[in-house]
Image (cartoon, rainbow, N blue to C red):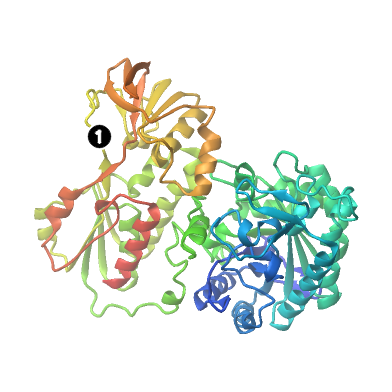
Amino acid sequence: MKYPHLFSPITLGNLTYRNRIFASPTGLPMVIPGEFLKRECIAFYEQRAKGGAASVSLGDCIVHTPTGLQHPYKPRLDDPYIISSLAAAARAISRHGAVAALELSHGGKFANNANFVTKTMSTGLPAYGPDEEMTPEGVLIREMPEELINTIVEAYGNAARLAKNMGFGMIVVHGGHGWLLHQFMSPKTNHRKDKFGGSLENRCRFALMALDAVRAAVGKSFPVEFRMSGAEFTPGGYDLEEGVEIAKLVSQKIDLLHVSAGVHDDPDSTVITHPSMFEEHGRNVFLAERIKKAVDCPVATIGALNDPEQMEEIIASGKADVVEMSRALTADPYLPLKAASGREDEIVRCIRCFLCLNQTTSTRNIRCAVNPVIGAELEHAYEPPKAAPGKRVLVVGGGPGGMEAALEAAKRGHDVTLCDDHDRLGGQMLCEEFVPFKREMYGYAGQKQRELEKAGVHIRCGTKVTRQWAEAFKPDILICAAGASPLKPPIPGIDLPNVKDIDDLRKEDNGIGKRVVIIGAGLVGCETAAHLLNLGHEVTILEMLDDYAVDATLWHKQALRQQIIGRADLRLGTRAVEITPEHITAEKDGVREIIPCDTVFCAAGLKPRVDVRNELRGITPYYYELGDCLKPGLLFHAISQGHFIGRDV
């Protein structure tokens, strides 16, 4: 086996796990009014078990609803209606050889009407935290009295007992990321004067009591995992050295110490908890490595891990005993099986765009930019029947949507030809080849091409499909995924040689000079700015709106903020008036300014290739359009449309 350490078993408590890859606790706001898990939610977890993970954990399960519900759509472990769906989830995970785990959590001061995400949730119940405080929104947080602490400790034990009785094989106690137990452990949020505040031992007392209650409920040999932040990475929070001392205390009561990072109420810390594309893979491994040297129990690490070779090195070198993943297994639940069977080149890598987190908070569904099956697992429980007879399918456009449509059509048994007028497949993804923080996105194009070749799709690059060409080809089915082209606003000088656009990023030598002015602070403009700043360019960004990255997800925008604010000259409410070979004229509030520059980069958006759509329409009655050629949008939309159209034909 190529990765013998990664796929060696590990024993925790009374269970032996089949490998060292755990699906970390992942919370999905997918419960229906009775507060029990939907079938779609259970199917999401089950697929991770099918994919080869040794343990699959349900996240964010609330132990005490009256004081702990930080989001209205979380499983409530003190509600008897939850029982049947919990048992179904445990069974769905366990029947594939994985250990079903359940995470016990409590929102603390972020519960009820003090929720920091929804801001609209109002239960009428008070919010309790370590201290009395007033939030910026004017919500009073009450100091949690000792009597209530004892009640919640009892709730942890009751929840653990319930989980064990429902068939779960491991309990995970959430003591990190800024939730209740962490709030008590943190010197930033705990200023109590009683036995639950002050010294480190006092601040950890609540967590230790909860662990004792869990252990009493499940027995001494039942696996218990504790999830903590190795360091908070926020002003006033504890650092790694104090994290080591916390780990020493809790490690005596558990079977596995899960070392994460950060707190969710600090946006700068959140993109460390969930490392953005600008962070190195495994950026938090050093926390686990340091803590492992100080404790006796096994240690798990997490943080943008998706490379089997890196994970093998982590286990083999003794930095950690277990690697945990969430987003990587959303992008490809079958990552463990692919790595174990030597099919690493088939792994779909997470591109760290934060679409999954954005969707769970905004639509209460789970979606993935590069995996259209996520959130639709029940619809894919059975493959569609083979086409009989197979038809001649022509797909025009080799971007992500076109590739996905061609692949799915080929799986159905059609004879598929995929044409693109560029010399390589990938569409806009080819612009990421020389952008280091986008290497997963560029790699997706290559991975998808390998799938197409294995599926027998006829690939014709450098082929411009005209109406005459398509008619001569005589397809039974035609799918247009011709994409979009850069939009050029009507600015004098926009066609000068010193004006570049996204297509120029396809070239290693793109002719971009030292001083760059970017027109447009949307997602493309901000990511381009981050890339050029990292290369040492001087960057000015002009944006007509009063905000930037408005088309980015909340978490990705925060990561972009770290990359460009203070590094680039970002000018909001400003429009470009004229471009010359030596400068650009900008205008704000009627005042014009000349900005010297070597290059102007136009990131004003994309326009659909309507001409291609119109030219190909009517050749065959079975005609489909998808992706940016309809309306420029997110990568997710193109891949999802391509996937389902390919299954439909």
- Identified at 50% across, 24% down, the residue is 536
Q: Which residue is mark 1?
A: 488
Where is the C terminus found, in terms of image quarters? Answer: bottom left
Q: Position of residue 214 (x, y in %)?
A: 81, 71
Identify which residue, 390 or 491, lies in the foreground. 491
* Above or below for 354 versus 22: above
Q: Position of residue 193 (x, y in %)?
A: 88, 50
Q: Amino acid at mark 1?
A: Lys
- The quadrant of the picture occupied by the N terminus is bottom right
Q: Is residue 375 above or below residue 189?
A: below
Q: Secondary structure at mark 1?
A: loop
The residue at the point 59 percent across, 53 percent down is 307
Percent x, y of residue 91: 62, 82
Residue at (60, 53) in percent of width and height: 116
Q: Residue at x 75, y 53 (%)?
A: 183
Q: Is residue 297 visible?
A: no
Left or right, residue 162 beside residue 519: right
Q: Is residue 133 visible?
A: yes
